[in-house]
Amino acid sequence: MLFNSIDFGIFLPIVFLLYWAMSKKVKAQNVFLLVASYFFYGWWDWRYLSLVLLCSITNYAAGVLMLRVNEDSDNAQKRRRLILLVCCLVSFGVLGVFKYYDFFVTSFVDAFSMLGIHLQATTLHLILPVGISFYTFHTLSYTIDVYRRKFEPTKDIVSFFLFVSIFPLAMAGPIERATNLLPQIYKRRTFDYALAVDGMRQILWGLFKKIVIADNCATIANEIFNNSANYSGSTLLLGAIFFTFQIYGDFSGYSDMALGIGKLLGFRFLRNFNFPYFSRNIAEFWRRWHISLNTWFRDYLYIPLGGSRGSKWQIVRNTFIIFLVSGFWHGANWTFIAWGAYHAILFLPVILLGKNRKYTDTVAEGRILPSLNEVCQMAVTFGLVVFGWIFFRAENITHAWSYVSGIFSASLFTMPHIHISSGEITLVFITILLLVEWLNRQQQHGLQTVNVKYPILRWIFYYALIMAIIELSAVDSQQFIYFQF
């Protein structure tokens, strides 16, 4: 069930009305929301609910078992560590089988083939369960935090199962932390009109980014990437730019809708995007892009490895590990690993020179227009990010290399040309996207404030967005990109 589908348009109002009809009974609300979340996920394929349940049961049991470990025992810490290890093996084992088994088998066979040794191996060809990477990391953050004694494990099985599977986050995050979400699940929630209105605005902006920006950019980017040998360097560069806005509109649009739906239900989920294309260096970009995943890797991988506190060699090692793992998290393909390595290379000079925390404020804060220096910084960072997205989008390393080679040819200096008429109007709406988000770059989302003198003008703007969503819906609606991760 997609957020931008008719099915969900029927599902959400029904859930909203029944949910708030139970507002005086938090346990009833939680049970109902859990059933609704399982229905939402099972709508895609009910068989894979078993994986959600396995992940939930394993991590819930791990928390309860850690709670029961006798702290006075000499072996208490060893037992807690063993429980965590088993939980991680089960969670990562399921993820590995469904997401990475075929990749490792194929890569193993190919490696021996290069040596003249031809092996026979069987691949599973399993369908990747939607959201498996998200709810796996979702639950493991809970278990690791319990192991670290950051909070007491819950005994409320309904609340925990809801934490794992709450439907706005079920498919593509953000990756929530138990420290943020579980306390909200426990307490009674009362309807907050102002929060719900802000949620509706955020949902509208998310729909605009997904349907008007991402889906129409996808039509053009797919045409160019799928037929890259037939296009000039300038057109290939334009295709990379269209994909840059496709993936941003698609994933940040999903996140906006997830956060907006959460607000309708009285929840405040973790923010996942903070206008990343206005970043002034690559470190700032990574603080603003897919925030929930990047902070997960920072807290549970980078810092335990030593972070940036060790020698230069250790900093280099830790930086490459976190980016390579991040790339591999995105998919079982060498292109994602290359994308991660590319960003590690970009990040190294920043962190080695101690400039990774240089830009923690908002660009051009307190000003409407940026300085010339800020424009140049944003342009360079954006260009580096665009180049990296080529590897992310390419079918394989060979395709990525030929695409890049095509860009850096004499035809780069010709006029780009595409055979799709919607290209010009899509560029207009990308400009509108950038303008709206620039004006609201100090807010939580693009429509948090619409500063116009007369309310009628604000409603005209909302109406224009709705009409654009209806009129410019792509003929072939695209599935959310991050569903494949």
Image (cartoon, rainbow, N blue to C red):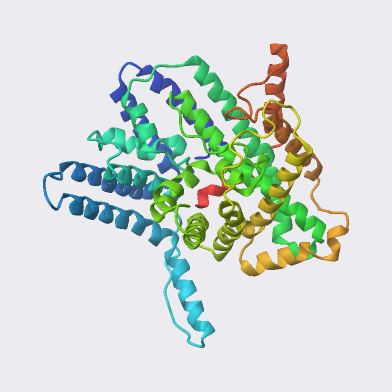
| Residue 412: percent from left, percent from top | 83, 60
| Left or right of 323, for residue 435 | right
| Residue 221: percent from left, percent from top | 71, 52
For the point 50% across and 79% down, the residue is 111
In the figure, 246 relative to 85: above or below? above
| Left or right of 331, for residue 471 | right
| Residue 191: percent from left, percent from top | 43, 16
| Residue 337: percent from left, percent from top | 54, 62
Number of callouts in the render?
A: 0
Query: Nearest the camera: 262 or 343?
Result: 343
**Seen from this angle, which residue lies furthest right?**
414
Quadrant of residue 212 in the image? top right
For the point 40% across and 43% down, the residue is 42
For the point 46% across and 16% down, the residue is 192
Residue 437: tell me if it is visible. yes
In the figure, 230 relative to 29: above or below? below
For the point 76% across and 30% down, the residue is 369
Residue 131: tell me if it is visible. no
In the figure, 25 relative to 158: above or below? above
| Left or right of 221, for residue 341 | left
Query: Nearest the camera: 367 or 166?
Result: 367
Query: Nearest the camera: 203 or 69?
Result: 69
Quadrant of residue 400 in the image? bottom right
**Seen from this angle, which residue lies furthest bottom?**
116
